[in-house]
Amino acid sequence: MPTKGLEKTFLKTIKEYNLFKKKDKLLLGVSGGPDSIALLYNVINLTKDYKLKIVCAHFNHGIRKESDREEKFIKELCSKLNIDFVSEKKNVNDFFAGDSLEQTARELRFDFFLKVSRQVKIKKLVLAHHKNDLAETVLMRIIRGTGLKGLRGFLPKSQFRSLTVVRPFIDLEKEQILNWLNEKNIPFCLDKSNQEVKFLRNKIRIGLLPQLEAINESITDRLSDLAVNAGLDYDFIYNFSKSEFRRLKQKRSSRGLSLGLKGLKELHPAVFNNVIRIAIEQIKGNTRRIDQNHLIEVKKLVLEGREAASIHLPKIVIKKEKKALSIQSLIL
């Protein structure tokens, strides 16, 4: 696709989802790979019209021997482009607890973005995720087992704690980005670990997606459509669940909250699951490691458990009281 095609789609996405505003302050997550480098240049091209303030943030995972060289490449590029640059290095392997190296890296990266956001007083994070990333994410979550929330993949605009996360490349495909960089003769780094099939995402990209493309050459678009439609349905259910959560919430403390037991028993199963997830998210800040089996346990406790019975979930204890369900954090 011609260069103008990428730039036109980029601008269209920004306007359609209201991703940028005039005089915005933006924190750009830049890894040094083709996607984030193309994002950096395209955002810079908007600075005149939008009067943007840009800070480039790079997290060095310390996993590969090329990591330091990539950090140096981005630092020198930002100096050349007169862009503020912030970086941090942490060896992800030192924090890996044996579950998912990818998830560990993601959590450390977002912790870094949150810290930089507070330091530079910028609350909008711009990431270079594109349509192929979205298709891979949807497939990965289907394989692991997911509901409507997981089928959304990621959104053009979302909230992560104090950060508004925007993805202006979400309607672009990888090939368009690479063609644009080649036409502009813009250098970038290549992460060789993207070819290592020990990671599930790489297995999907290298092995599964080409097989699906042989069946349906538009599979990336169809998976993107699935994410959009699931997102619309989930948004409706979530907003209704949020209102039910507010109705059922009885009291809140620094470490927990209580929900009305009678009202919980009357909820539709889909709404029940979301109300419990909303409650857990309010207590521990996220719903990581909370799966369908946990929700089934909670449902059984509400409907069949005796008074004073309790169950333990990751970092959470849930107890059935006479007229309420108590959800408390186990973190002091």
Image (cartoon, helix red, strand yellow):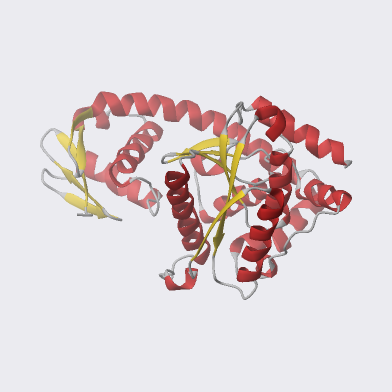
Q: Quadrant of the N terminus?
A: top right
Q: Horizontal placement of 57 versus 296: left or right?
A: right
Residue in front for this viewpoint, 308 or 118? 118
Residue in front for this viewpoint, 285 or 149? 285
Looking at the rendered structure, the number of numbered marks drawn on it comes to: 0
Q: Horizontal placement of 54 versus 47: left or right?
A: left
Identify the image quadrant of residue 99: bottom left
Q: Is residue 54 visible?
A: yes
Q: Is residue 197 visible?
A: no
Q: Horizontal placement of 71 versus 186: left or right?
A: left
Residue in front for this viewpoint, 6 or 187? 187
Q: Position of residue 204 (x, y in %)?
A: 66, 59
Q: Residue at image x 43%, y 51%?
A: 115
Identify the image quadrant of residue 270: top left
Judged from this view, the residue extending furthest toward the bottom is: 65
Identify the image quadrant of residue 73: bottom right
Say above or below: 332 vs 43.
Answer: below
Q: Horizontal placement of 187 versus 205: left or right?
A: right
Q: Quadrant of the C terminus?
A: bottom left
Q: Residue at image x 45%, y 40%?
A: 121
Q: Position of residue 216 (x, y in %)?
A: 79, 46
Q: Position of residue 236 (x, y in %)?
A: 48, 26
Q: Position of residue 129 (x, y in %)?
A: 64, 47
